[in-house]
Image (cartoon, rainbow, N blue to C red):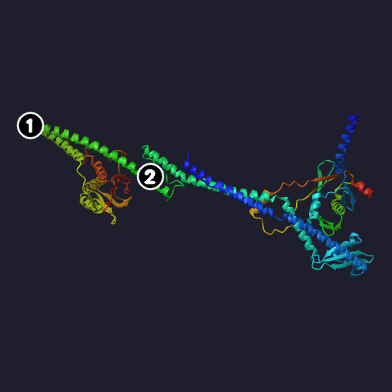
Amino acid sequence: MNRIRSKLIVAFLAATIVPLVATVYIMTSLLERSLSYATTEELDRLSESLHETALDYYQQAREDLKEDAKAGAVAHRTMLLANRADWPGPSNDFWESGESERFDLAGSGGEDLEYFVRHEEGVWVYTQRFGKVRMDEITAQYRSARELVDLAKARDLRRGLTTTLIVLVAAVWIVSLAWLIYLATRMSHPIQQLTAGLSGLAAGNLATRIPVGRAGLAGRNDEIGQAIAAFNHTAAQLEQNRERLVYLTQIASWQTLARKMAHELKNSLTPIRLTVEEILARQTEAERPFMAQAAQIVVNEIESLERRVRAFSEFSAEPAIRLSGFDLNAVLEERVSFLSPGHPGIDYQITADPNLPHVRADADRIKGILNNLLENAAEAIGTRGRILSTLYMSDGQVVVEIHDSGPGLSEEALKTLFEPTITFKARGMGLGLSIARKDALVCGGDLLLVDGKLEGAGFRLVLPRNPRN
Amino acid sequence: MRASTIMTGAALVLLISVCPAISRAESLKVHLNGDQLHMEAHDLRFLSQAALARLHDGATVIYRFRLLVSASRNGNPTAEYTYHCVFSFDILEEKYKVSRQEPGYRTASHLSESAARDLCLDSLTIPAASMGANTPFWISMEYQMEDRQSSVDRSESPSVLDSLVNIFGQKKKDPQPVDMLRGGPYRMEDFRKAK
């Protein structure tokens, strides 16, 4: 399934196996050649030769010393039995052995040959020097050489070196392969996710996102990380735009319906009002007071309906958009200054951003949106409270948030917050927020509900910055 | 007639092949010297060919001996004594040297092979006081050459590569065989009477 990873592994295998086999072949060939120069057999032969030479030399020295001793050509030391307590160890050992004669090496390095002869009165010791030859050293060298030969024979050096080479090279190669598989998985996994995400997006699932908080993808700043970020951003934009499009389509339908309703109602209300006035004019003097009162009630209701008809007409009206660049800080401050005198118990606070770039939008509509939001907030607060307005930049867009300290929105209100509704409250027709969001959308921005910072409601108006800034 | 001859021949061959083992198993002798029982086996050439080859290469060879005392021939040991004899060979004098390591260090040099063997065996002792006067006992002697200990100076510890080469290049080595001699039944009273 993971084709990229498989291809990477196959590429690694194809790229490394042939050089690896060639390298191992060359190295084992060199090993074979170098081992053919090995000196174990030579050492074996030389050590045996050394032994024979030393033995001959020693035996000859023994014979010479013995003959010289018999001929009296060499002086001797006499170890008297009376002084046995002072005898050196070799003399004692010889006496205790019961032998008639004995040869032994003496001196710190075996450079002297001693000849012990048993006599009645004690031991005669003849000594002869080997000169510069130190027999103990020769013996030690022979022993060491034989041990090395034995060690070499006890193991198959060729097999040991070749197997070690192959095992180590294989281990390095396997570690490299494991590392490559890990890297290939790490590299191909996000690509797989990206592919799956694109497939989901193409299938119409605009909610598709690639998780970036997971270990392994978090903090990636390479091309893959950038592609994932771009994908998520694009998917979010598409989802947002689709939701906005749906909303605008709904608003357009509602506008068409409102326009037709207003037209039909207006057509009906005018004859009704004229007819009621005509009925009132034709009444006798006796019945006129009652009829006047009844007619007044009907007229009042007709006027109420006419106000709604006008509101529907305004809602359905679609005046041309006049986009221009302006300072949102100034517009907000101007709106607050304009509205605040009507609400003396409310504390208006503005957190302006002096470096805020200008926005590009229809200034009249934006004023209308701000009016709506500020007045709604004031109405929710009542007589005393606080309204906080904050301006800042986010994702290259200019944002103004308006929070109030009112009771907040009910669950019921949240469900149909931006939908046009008909309300019979004293002020407003229930169309304000839907008109406000529609105006924000047609200006290239949006109006969103956010968590309130003052425990009441909070709204965010997003507007595009003026590219000519 | 011919079949019976073949059968008799086969029996003789079998007997001849088994006899050395039987005789070896029974060839351990014991004598009392002072308050110690000493081992003797003059016909036992326990120094193997491998041991002799090593000795002639100038190396030392260590033999480990276990003396097991039991109440019956194949009974469980009631006492055990372990000794080590270290043999070496003077390549110039062509004489042997033998040292007993425990319980006290004893050494002798300029020996023939048989003298070295006998001296080693004679130095293997069992305290006579540990034996009952009339209780019969058997003595088994197990002996084994210990593995070589390198005397070549290698002051540097082997690297990983050296270790790997040694592991992969090691030839299959048979463990040193453990041989055994057995003697008995003995009684301390018999030794004292003979003395």
Q: Which mark is residue A232?
A: 2
Q: Quadrant of residue A256?
A: top left
| Image side of residue B53 versus residue A448, left or right | right
Q: Which kind of residue does numbered mark 2 sit on?
A: Asn
Residue A426 or residue A178, whichever sits in front: A178
Expressed as whole percent of the image width and height from the top left, the position of residue A452 reads: 32, 47
Query: Under tag 2, what secondary structure?
Result: helix
Expressed as whole percent of the image width and height from the top left, the position of residue A249 reads: 26, 38
* Same-chain status of marks 1 and 2: yes
Query: Under tag 1, what secondary structure?
Result: helix
| Image side of residue A143 versus residue A289, left or right | right
Residue A376 or residue B50, whichever sits in front: B50
Expressed as whole percent of the image width and height from the top left, the position of residue A3 reads: 47, 41
Q: Quadrant of residue A140?
A: bottom right
Distance in Å between CA atoms under marks 1 and 2: 68 Å
Q: Chain of mark 1?
A: A
Name the residue: 47% across, 43% down.
A4
Q: Which kind of residue does numbered mark 1 sit on?
A: Glu
Name the residue: 36% across, 40% down.
A206
- How many labels sit on residues? 2
Q: Nearer the viewer, mark 1 or mark 2?
A: 2
Residue located beneath label 1 in the image? A278
Judged from this view, the residue extending furthest toward the left is A285
Q: Is residue B173 visible?
A: yes
Q: Is residue B101 visible?
A: no
Q: Chain of mark 2?
A: A
Q: Which mark is residue A267?
A: none
| Image side of residue A220 versus residue A462, left or right | right
Q: Using a 10 Å C-alpha cutoff, classify the residue at mark 1 as few (fewer than 14 neighbours), some (14 to 19) or many (20 or more).
A: few
> Which of the two labelled residues, at mark 1 and mark 2, occupies the earlier sequence position?
2
Residue A291 or residue B33, whichever sits in front: B33
Expressed as whole percent of the image width and height from the top left, the position of residue A218 reads: 44, 48
